[in-house]
Image: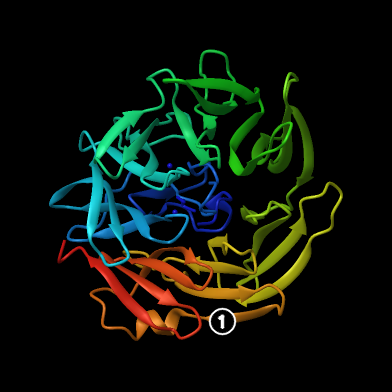
Amino acid sequence: MEASILRRSEQSLATRRPADRTVNWGLTAARVGSGRVVARSALLVLACLTCVGASESVPGLCVCAWLRPGARGERVAFALERPDAPRGILVVDTQGKVLAGTTATSESSYDYPVGWLPQAASLAFLRFNRGAKGQVGSGSGGLLGILDVSTNRVSWVSLESERAKDAYVTETGGFVCSMASDQGTGRNGDLYRVEREGQRWSWQPLAAGDATRSWRGCLWARATSSGFKAIAEAEREGAVTTEREIWALAEDRGRDAAATMLWILPPGAYSAAVSPDGRRMAYLLWEEASDTTKVYIVSTEKGSTANRVVTVEGEVFCAVFAPDGARLLLYTPGLAPPVPDLRQFLSVVDLARSSVSDLLPAIVGASLAERSVYSAEWLDSSQLVIGTQGGTLCTLDITTRTLRKLWACSEG
């Protein structure tokens, strides 16, 4: 959805798209060629991929992307880009009232909402800067900030020396951050645990990167009675291929963090997402020959075997667990300009029944300024919040298929 984001297929698109194709998405785009595609870390909350690259948004287009609903579904934060205004974040309530927002500091920077702190009036976000050629590499990183919605003021968690690729908000009000690469040492970026100590923030190493392994981000984290545990994703450069690894991290008071690799994902697997209780993980696998996407679920216990839940037609970019863990949101955005062999997709999988409900007709049949789904997230376990390519923010009841407009770029 570097979103959630996004929370978008995170595997190298070079293996799945013809060379030299540009795919617009979110506030940025991905240049697809024979080399590696620069993509943001798998996030956290929004278990989607956001590819970062050189192209600008389509002229005249207003995009709502990287949606972050509050924990109780009472407000939504989203990244907004339109040609006539600076990039930034807006926060609206469920009646569409604008509560607060941020404004990027320059034309080359943009803000990306990370998630809500336990005190629901505070939103964490990352501020990235495009380089001289308009590109944001995985090594560039961003500054981590907190927006107080009640006062509309921003405070900063990180300094210039602490540049994060991605961040996961913990229930204690801290973060797990994957850091930008250190070109001086050749390390691919470490994973840090960030906690407030009085009036300052403490940055403590959780897992170290090295010459071949890069920590992409934290998928899930919780405090325990004796410390802290997390599930994180790493990328390891092999001699022939790049492997995606899933690790369990445990930190006991007074001891160094212990890391256990749970699995290496199958070649081509992407969009890893962990359930809210931390017990299951979902991932996607697209097969080009049949143009189908297989959805897998696996227990987060070491040695568990993945089970295929459903197979759907077309290429799905994102998988997101519902807050109650009972359903999985699947979607592919409608891109502008369109990619001929890529169709937008919006469905919900009932994991107990292994059934799929197609929700796209509710969007396409609506009287919106633009009927392409650009970003989607769970508002609560029965409703989605959707941002369209035309700059409309709406909610969708997955049972009644009732669509309700919250906010529109044309009216904001």
Q: Amino acid at mark 1?
A: Ser
Quadrant assignment, res 131: top left
Residue shown at the point (38%, 40%) measured from the top left: 125
Which element is circle 1 on?
A: strand
x and y percent of residue 279 in the render? Answer: 73, 54
Return the residue nearer the eye: 224 or 304: 224
- Farthest residue in the top direction? 184
**Residue 52 in sight from this viewpoint:** no
Give x and y (percent) for residue 93: 30, 60
Q: Is residue 291 above or below residue 210?
A: below
Q: Position of residue 33 (x, y in %)?
A: 47, 48
Q: Is residue 258 above or below residue 308?
A: above
Image position of 217 (left or right of 374): right
Q: Nearer the viewer, residue 211 or 225?
A: 225
Query: Residue visible at 40% across and 67% down?
Result: 385
Q: Which residue is mark 1?
A: 357
- Other-residue count near label 1 (Cα within 10 Å), few / some / many at <14 / 14–19 / ≥20: few
Q: Residue at x 49, y 66 (%)?
A: 380
